[in-house]
Image: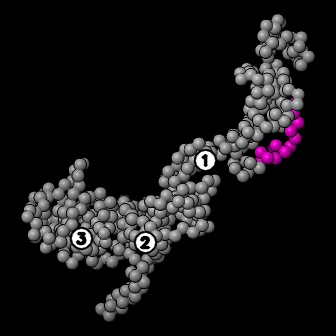
């Protein structure tokens, strides 16, 4: 037996505290390393019935070979006579198995070198598995990390037991990522590699907006208000469609909060990114009108609504065309992502000049009814200034409320 003392056990406990690798894993690795070193020492690749045993009480480790007790030995490597076995254990009988120590002399240095290599490898494997298991569970969720550095336009973020990579396409345009700053990121993917798993995170994912709303709006966490859809162009604008499962709770008002406190907190977390809170509707006409806010809509014609295609033709006043389309098409693009409908927008003058009018899948009576619906929805949107929320709206919120209170008193 080789005396290794208590240093190994102290090292095991330290590794368990620092890396979360159990002492049993390290001891098993050490025993495997001893067996590997023994095979190399006797220059045999396959040696059956050999194992290493560590006595934690005495702090000794040795290599043992299991042999079968027989009357006549035919295979010395696998069998032992009863007489020889009695010298090891007086109570042994025929057909019993006994463990015979075969630790070579001066085996300590060779065993130590082999043990170091095997233990290092096993520690890496165990650490890799721990990281992989942990972040597989975190995949698709938000986590907090610390920015470490920027390499080749990739931001390296420490998220606990490993460093994650934030590719350029998952970063917010124009954002400065300063090393040492804390950051909330979305765990996008976990890839297995030969070393530690590679974790991909995002600072531009739409789910970040969802989780921020869930944190700030109790009604969403309780299931009273439900987020139906989110479309986001990180750093610029986000549209979020919400609905209420309680007729007494206004979904949009709940997300904005008293005096805009909830939405202000979210906007601050997103570095002043614009947020449009849209009221969801099962009626596609109403949903499209809401999604295109703050633009006013004249009419919405449903051109196709089946499993293969969802297309709508929207007419807006001439002075609302640029607002409906948005800068570089952003507003209509976000509305398309939010609703899942392909939206073609024309001004009234453009629609009048078209050689042919779109052919909606509805009769004249349905079309007249739809136009009345659009007028009602547009009027409702004009009465509510909560859909497009920005810092200027919040700055004027208190003054507007005060003026409304004064007018109601005068009346």
Q: Which mark is residue 273?
A: 2
- Rounded to the nearest angstrom, the CA distance separating label 3 from label 2 is 26 Å
Q: Position of residue 129 (x, y in %)?
A: 61, 43
Asked if the stretch drawn in magenta spans residue 289, the answer is: no
246 or 150, nearer to the observer: 150
**Residue at 10% across, 63% down:** 357
Say what secondary structure mark 2 lies in. loop
1 vs 2, front mark: 1
Residue 407 visible: yes
Q: Which mark is residue 100?
A: none
Q: Which mark is residue 377?
A: 3
Range drawn in magenta: 1-13
Judge whether 262 appears above or below 356 on screen.
below
- Rounded to the nearest angstrom, the CA distance separating label 1 from label 2 is 35 Å
Q: Position of residue 6 (x, y in %)?
A: 86, 43
Q: Earlier in the sequence, mark 1 or mark 2?
A: 1
Residue 144 visible: no
The number of callouts visible is 3
Say what secondary structure mark 1 lies in. loop
3 vs 2, front mark: 2
Q: Earlier in the sequence, mark 3 or mark 2?
A: 2
**Residue at 88% across, 31% down:** 106
Q: Earlier in the sequence, mark 1 or mark 3?
A: 1
Q: Position of residue 292 (x, y in %)?
A: 28, 68
216 or 6, nearer to the observer: 6
218 or 168, nearer to the observer: 168
Residue at label 1? 196
Q: Quadrant of residue 78?
A: top right
| Drawn side of residue 148 relative to residue 23, left or right | left
| Drawn side of residue 20 relative to residue 366, left or right | right
């Amino acid at each position: 037996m080789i005396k290794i003392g208590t240093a190994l056990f102290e090292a095991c406990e330290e590794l368990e505290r620092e890396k979360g690798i159990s002492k049993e894993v390290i001891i098993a690795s050490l025993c495997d390393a001893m067996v590997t070193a023994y095979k190399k020492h006797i220059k045999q690749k396959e040696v059956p019935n050999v194992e290493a045993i560590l006595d934690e009480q005495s702090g000794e480790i040795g290599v043992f070979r299991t042999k079968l007790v027989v009357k006549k030995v035919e295979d010395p490597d696998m069998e032992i006579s009863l007489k020889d076995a009695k010298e090891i254990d007086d109570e042994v009988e025929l057909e019993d198995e006994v463990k015979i120590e075969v630790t070579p002399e001066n085996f300590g240095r060779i065993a130590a070198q082999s043990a170091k290599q095997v233990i290092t490898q096993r520690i890496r494997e165990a650490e890799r598995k721990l990281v992989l298991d942990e972040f597989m569970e975190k995949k698709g969720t938000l986590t907090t990390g610390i920015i470490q550095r920027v390499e080749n336009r990739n931001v390296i973020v420490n998220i606990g037991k490993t460093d994650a990579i934030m590719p350029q396409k998952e970063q917010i345009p124009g954002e400065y990522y300063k090393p040492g700053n804390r950051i909330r990121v979305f765990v996008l993917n976990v890839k297995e590699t030969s070393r530690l798993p590679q974790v991909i995170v995002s600072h531009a994912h739409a789910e970040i907006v969802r989780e921020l709303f869930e944190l700030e709006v109790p009604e969403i966490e309780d299931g009273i208000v439900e987020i139906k859809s989110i479309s986001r162009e990180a750093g610029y604008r986000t549209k979020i469609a919400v609905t209420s499962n309680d007729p007494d709770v206004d979904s949009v008002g709940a997300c904005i909060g008293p005096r805009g406190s909830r939405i202000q907190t979210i906007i601050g977390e997103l570095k002043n990114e614009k947020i449009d809170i849209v009221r969801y509707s099962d009626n596609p006409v109403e949903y499209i009108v809401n999604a295109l806010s703050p633009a006013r809509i004249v009419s919405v014609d449903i051109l196709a609504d089946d499993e293969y295609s969802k297309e709508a033709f929207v007419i807006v006043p001439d002075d609302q065309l640029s607002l409906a389309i948005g800068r570089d098409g952003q507003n209509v693009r976000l509305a398309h992502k939010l609703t899942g409908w392909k939206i073609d927008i024309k001004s009234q003058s453009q629609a009048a000049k078209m050689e042919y009018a779109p052919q909606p899948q509805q009769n004249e009576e349905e079309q007249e009814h739809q136009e009345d619906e659009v007028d009602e929805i547009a009027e409702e949107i004009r009465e509510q200034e909560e859909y497009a929320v920005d810092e200027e709206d919040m700055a004027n919120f208190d003054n507007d409320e005060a003026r409304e209170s004064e007018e109601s008193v005068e009346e």
